[in-house]
Amino acid sequence: MLPLNESLYSLEGAELQFMKKQTGIEDDAELKEHILAVTKEAFAVFPFPCIRRYAFIKFKLSRLPGYDRLLKLGREREGAILLDIGCCFGNDVRNAAVDGFPAKQIVASDLYGGYWTLGHKLYRSTEESFPAKFIPGDAFDPAHLAIVPPVYTVGSEPPPDLSTLTSLNPLHGHVAAIHASSFFHLFNEEKQAQLARAFAGLLSPLPGSMIIGTHSGAPEKGQRTYAVSSGSGIISGGGTLSMFCHSPESWAELWDGQIFEKGTIKVEASLVEHPRMPESPSQQAYFLRWCITRL
């Protein structure tokens, strides 16, 4: 396991100002020390590369096409629920709350509950000052998130009281917006499809309901292998990293016709070039940015 590397820390612009406002720490050096201390604790929970590379303090959701529509759901749809899967410290939903999505209507979930607890320490918040509901659990565990068919008509059953939730299953058919970034690419093609089916069952049938996110993609669907240096914060000693990547076309085909009935959703998906790895300048990596919206 690679140790933490302080030289990988970088925080500026809107993300820096957000952290200062959330923590109340204005001094850059003091803020850095605060973040480094909490990061050390988070690394002990589980040493994900995103922890070592301080990626958990970077915005993803607010930089995606569709974010403004998500905020509009929070403003205009009564009781609209926002669910963040693989939330880590919860920086994206915290930012969404600052931007106007009601915090009491936010649900967050992660396999490691320790991250959410440390999120309160990182952002100097409490369950009262940031009342989003956190539910720890494995997205592949049916007791936490069972796969059910998508709902196409509005039912008579009201949404659950979020404060009473112990799993995501009572949310089936009730979620206005689901966010999942840097999540799908952790799994193979079969498990990505399984996750898509699970998320689809949670989504409200009301027009405008959305599933939004970003993860590694490729111009053509398939398994991709990347050379990784020891300084990347991913693999100790360097080596290769293999993952299954969808293309924008295959991602759209998965959702429109396989997961949802064809023509009942709109899929927006595009590739963005990721900075090239210095040890392999000829190798281009991509991120798939996407939004699935009910029609």
Image: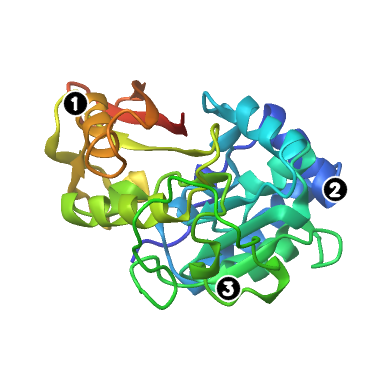
Based on the displayed image, in which of its 4 quarters is residue 254 positioned?
A: top left
Q: Amino acid at mark 1?
A: Gln
Residue ID at (54%, 48%) = 154
Residue 258 against residue 275 in the figure, above or below: below
Q: Nearer the viewer, residue 133 or 24?
A: 133
Residue ID at (31%, 37%) = 216
Cα–Cα gap, marks 1 and 3:
36 Å
Q: Position of residue 124 (x, y in %)?
A: 81, 60
**Mark 3 or 2: the one toward you:** 3
Residue receiving disc 1? 283
First along the sequence among labels 2 and 1 = 2
**Helix, strand or loop for disc 3:** helix
First along the sequence among labels 1 and 3 = 3
Q: Nearer the viewer, residue 166 or 55?
A: 166
User: Dot 1, crowdedness within 10 Å: few (<14), some or many (≥20)?
Assistant: few
Q: Nearer the viewer, residue 54 or 213?
A: 213
User: Dot 3, crowdedness within 10 Å: few (<14), some or many (≥20)?
Assistant: some
Residue 195 against residue 134 in the figure, above or below: above
Residue receiving disc 2? 25
Residue receiving disc 3? 114
Cα–Cα gap, marks 2 and 1:
40 Å
